């Protein structure tokens, strides 16, 4: 793979507020998609923009923020349909712990955004413990080994049932792991 050729097909646009982001979605991006044969758009991250602009402790700000998220969603869906694009929006998550000490993952964009998505895919890093056979004459000839792997799960989709897989990334490849 020629890395320079790959990099020449990646376009990055920095947006500093929601107005700037919407402007790019309505003018710059459609033009780029038409002229450069774009097939995939990755947005990272809407949460960073709207979190810095709108204090969610204020009810009026929550309404404005929700309306902006709906406008962004509408434009992204229009782009996907009009230009036959795959669009991936990265949404950060935070972990909250209930009074019963149960851990729960909470998407940063909240309830309004959850009504806008077509599918939810969760990507996480896990500590996978595997048993490997030892070559010496130890007690049980097995030892536990821990390594970090990634887990990709389809959390929600109108087309497929939930599923997932473990995989690892090395300097030379990406490969699935049987567990």
Image (cartoon, rainbow, N blue to C red):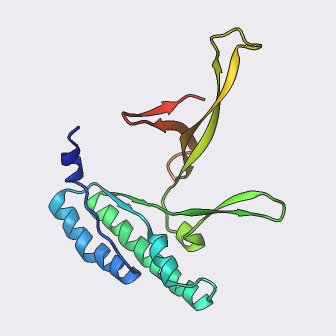
Most extreme residue toward the bottom is: 60
Percent across and percent down for residue 143 are 69, 22
Is 164 placed left or right of 35 in the picture? right
Q: Nearer the viewer, residue 43 or 48?
A: 48
Residue that appears at 39% across and 81% down: 17
Residue that appears at 38% across and 36% down: 171
Q: Look at the picture and state if 17 lies above or below 100.
A: below
Regarding residue 69, the answer to whether it shows in the image is yes
Q: How many marks?
A: 0
Residue that appears at 35% across and 76% down: 21
Most extreme residue toward the right is: 100
Q: Look at the picture and state if 94 lies above or below 154.
A: below
Percent across and percent down for residue 49 are 45, 76
Is 71 placed left or right of 100 in the picture? left
Percent across and percent down for residue 92 are 53, 63
For the N terminus, give its image quadrant: top left
Quadrant of res 38: bottom left
Quadrant of res 43: bottom left
Is 16 placed left or right of 166 in the picture? left
Residue that appears at 33% across and 62% down: 80
For the C terminus, give its image quadrant: top right
Q: Look at the picture and state if 146 lies above or below 39.
A: above
Regarding residue 162, the answer to whether it shows in the image is no
Percent across and percent down for residue 56 are 60, 82
């Amino acid at each position: 793979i020629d890395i320079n050729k790959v990099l020449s097909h990646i376009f990055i646009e920095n947006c500093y507020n929601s107005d700037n982001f919407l402007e790019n979605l309505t003018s710059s991006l459609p033009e780029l998609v038409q002229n450069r044969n774009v097939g995939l758009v990755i947005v990272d991250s809407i949460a960073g923009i709207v979190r810095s602009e709108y204090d969610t402790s204020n009810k009026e700000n929550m309404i404005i923020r929700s309306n902006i998220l709906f406008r962004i969603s509408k434009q992204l869906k229009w782009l996907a349909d009009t230009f036959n694009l795959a669009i991936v929006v990265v949404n950060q998550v935070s972990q909250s712990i209930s009074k019963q000490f149960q851990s729960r993952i909470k998407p940063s964009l909240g309830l309004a955004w959850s009504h806008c998505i077509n599918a939810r895919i969760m990507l996480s890093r896990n500590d996978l413990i595997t048993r490997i056979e030892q070559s010496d004459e130890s007690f049980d000839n097995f030892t536990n080994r821990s390594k970090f792997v990634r887990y990709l799960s389809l959390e929600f989709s109108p087309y497929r049932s939930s599923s997932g897989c473990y995989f690892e990334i090395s300097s030379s490849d990406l490969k699935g792991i049987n567990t």
